[in-house]
Each structure stands twice: as C-alpha cells, then as structure tokens.
Image: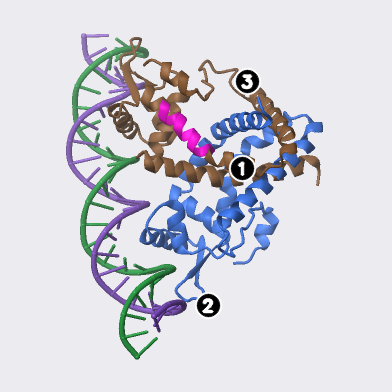
Chain colours: A brown, B blue, C purple, D green
Amino acid sequence: MSKIEQFHLALKEWIQIFMRHSMHSFTEWMGENDLSRSQVGALMMINHRKNCQVTMIGEDLGISTPAASQLVDRLVQLDMVERREDKEDRRNKKLALRKKGRQLIQEGFKARMGWVDELIEYIPENELEDITNGFRSMIKASEKIDKKSTKNSDEKIVVWKIQTDQELENDES
Amino acid sequence: MSKIEQFHLALKEWIQIFMRHSMHSFTEWMGENDLSRSQVGALMMINHRKNCQVTMIGEDLGISTPAASQLVDRLVQLDMVERREDKEDRRNKKLALRKKGRQLIQEGFKARMGWVDELIEYIPENELEDITNGFRSMIKASEKIDKKSTKNSDEKIVVWKIQTDQELENDES
DNA sequence: TTTAATAGTTAATTGGCGTTAACTATAAGC
DNA sequence: GCTTATAGTTAACGCCAATTAACTATTAAA
C-alpha cells in the first residue's frame, strides 16, 4: 500500500471515530438547548455568509422558502437572529446573528469538542508534538484549497473563529 | 504554550475546517436518500456495536425504547437492517446491517470525504507518513476510551473499515 | 404604465417522529 | 412456583417542522 493510500485510510478511520463522538455530544447539546437541526443549520449559515437572505437559507438547508421564513422568524423571536430590510432592495431581508445566536454557535462547538480533552489524556506525551505538526500541515493544505475555491466569487466567506468569552462579552449587538 | 495546549489548538482548528467541509455535503446526501438523522444514527450505531440491541439505540440517540423499536422496524422494512432473536436470551433482538445498510453508510461517508482527495494533493509527500502515524496514535487513544466506557460489557467494538466495492459485492446477505 | 419577476410572509394542512400507556414474552430471584 | 425485572412491541395520540396555495410588496422589463 502506498503512503498516500495509508494516509487516506488512517484519515478516514479517524474521521469516522471523530464523527461518532462529536455528533453524539452535539445532538445531546441540541436537545438540551431545544434546537432543531434546521435551526442550527440556519444559525451556521447566517454565521458563515455575509448578507445572508431568507431564500439562501432555504436553498442551503434544502427546504422551501416559506419554511425558511418561518424558521428565521422563530430565531428572531428567540433573539438569536436579526432581520432587517435591505435599503438597496427593500424586498430583501438581511440576516445576522445577535449575541445570543453567536454564543449558541460557540457553545455548540464546545459541546462537540468535549471528548477531545479526554482523548488527549490517552495520547503518549512524546507523540503530541508530531501530531500537532501534522494538523498544522493539513490546515495549511486546506487553506490553499479555500483560497483557490473562493477566488472567482465576490461573496466573502467569513472564516469561523472561536471567540474567547472575553471577546463575546465585549461584543456589542 | 505547552505542547498539550498547542495540540488542542491545532486540533480545534482542524476540526472547524473539517466540519465546514463535510457537514453540508452529508446533509445533502441524507436528503437525497430520504434518511432522517435518527435513521443515520441508528445505522451507525448498529454498524459500530456488535450484538447491538434495540434499547441501546434508544439510549444512544436519546429516545425512548418504543421510538427505537419503531425506528428499527422501518429500517428492517427498508431491508437495511436485520433483526433476529438472540438464542441465549430470547428477549433480546440482535441487530446487524444488511448489504443495503452497509452500502448506505459507506456512501454517506464518501459524501463527507470528497474533499479529502483534494486535500491530499496539497500536503507535501514527505510529511504524509508522519501524519499517518499521528492519526494511528489518536485512533489507538480513542479505542482506549471506547473500551473504558464499555468496560462492564464484553461487547467488542467493531472498528469501522472501508470495504472496497469488490468486498461489498462479495458480501452475502 | 402595464406586466412580469423576485423576495418574503401568512394560512391551512400534512406527515414523520416522538411520547406515554398497556401489553407479550422471557429470564432471574426469593 | 410465584413474583419481579428486563427486552421489546403495539396502539393511541401530540407536536413540530415541512409542504402547497394564496397573498403583499418591491423591482425590473416591455
């Protein structure tokens, strides 16, 4: 088996394991916070795209526009999302996360990551550095892909970043 | 920053990137195949645990046993899952994937993984081997956690492995 | 300016997935 | 052997998120 094939196999197995662990805790977290899959998807979409509109959410989640509208409406009522008229084209509604929505997204991510802390305890300490470098290498590689795939679109992708609690606290909205 | 902190940071960043790439295509795939989150969860659970029982699925997905029973029943009717009496304890029903279920799991996984092939092209070849070993190390660590969490049961964890199309073809049932 | 297209909302309806309650069947304990 | 516990199923029901249809409002096109 070539090095590439071996890498492929190891990565796939790892991702499988990761999925199993993170999905589970993420689902639990969704239940605890009374969030549906669609709601989370919509929050992520709004978080990820600038000037996100209602129809976009429908397209992204694969649901009809009325469904998206109702979905957004619920999120607005929950004070997670802000919906305001676009002044250029008053048919559009611009969507953005409010503080509560941003906090939720972040907490959801933390929920997914819970098992990682446990994982670290089981990795021999002398291997940690090599593995870290491996991740960095893959991160670099994926950045190259991102740059390549977004060059011909004028829509800016907001690369999602974990905010510290302090940053969240200072964040007006 | 300690080695552990650095590892943590790199892993988190990597996971963010991975999530962004894989979640969307996976959701799309679920829609195309008329699968609900619970159904996928159940299939994964059955795939993962040997001698998987109905109640286990309920516990894992956070739903009641009757709900799990109905869920399994649907999957049986769809010919994705096999449900047979345990001869040691005839109250139990042993669950296992049928060919169709295994194929679905594999295809769903491929849907998530499409971008990985592209990723590999951007990783320097001389780093591949080290990264592969890193993954193997993490896989081992997670297996230890799995063993610990199922310590009072003698159930073996089936490490999920990608079957080739040939293997799937030859696979009876 | 009349018509058509686009963006979104509202309303009525549906269907899947969940719940509880009641039941069967098997196994374990006293 | 009688009782209790466990595993799962069936039935009746509820809820929520989706659908379609019909509508308003704004913009673009003829």
Which residue is nearer to you in this view: D1 or A153? D1
Relative to B118, B150 lies left or right: left
Res A147 label: 3
Q: Are marks 2 and 3 in contact (CB under 8 Å)?
A: no
Q: Residue at 52% x, 20% y: name it.
A: A157
Q: Position of residue A43 (x, y in %)?
A: 41, 29
Q: Residue at 50% x, 62% y: name it.
A: B79
Query: Neighbour class for label 1 at 10 Å: few (<14), some, many (≥20)?
Result: some
Seen in the picture, residue D14 relative to A11 is either above or below; the reply is below
Query: Neighbour class for label 2 at 10 Å: few (<14), some, many (≥20)?
Result: few
Residue type, mark 1 in image: Leu
Distance between the Cα atoms at labels 2 and 3? 58 Å
Nearer the viewer's eye, disc 2 or disc 3?
Answer: 2
Q: Which type of secondary structure does the marked residue at label 3 adopt?
A: helix
Query: Neighbour class for label 3 at 10 Å: few (<14), some, many (≥20)?
Result: few
User: Dividing the picture into quarters, in which one does residue A119 lie?
Assistant: top right
Quarter containing the C terminus of chain B: bottom right
Q: Position of residue B85 (x, y in %)?
A: 49, 74
Nearer the viewer's eye, disc 1 or disc 3?
Answer: 1
Which residue is nearer to you in this view: A168 or B69? A168
State whether discs 1 and 3 lie on one chain: yes
Res A119 label: 1
Residue B27 in the magenta stretch? The answer is no
- Which chain is home to disc 2? B
Residue type, mark 2 in image: Lys
- Which chain is home to disc 1? A
Check disc 2 and report the residue beneath it.
B87
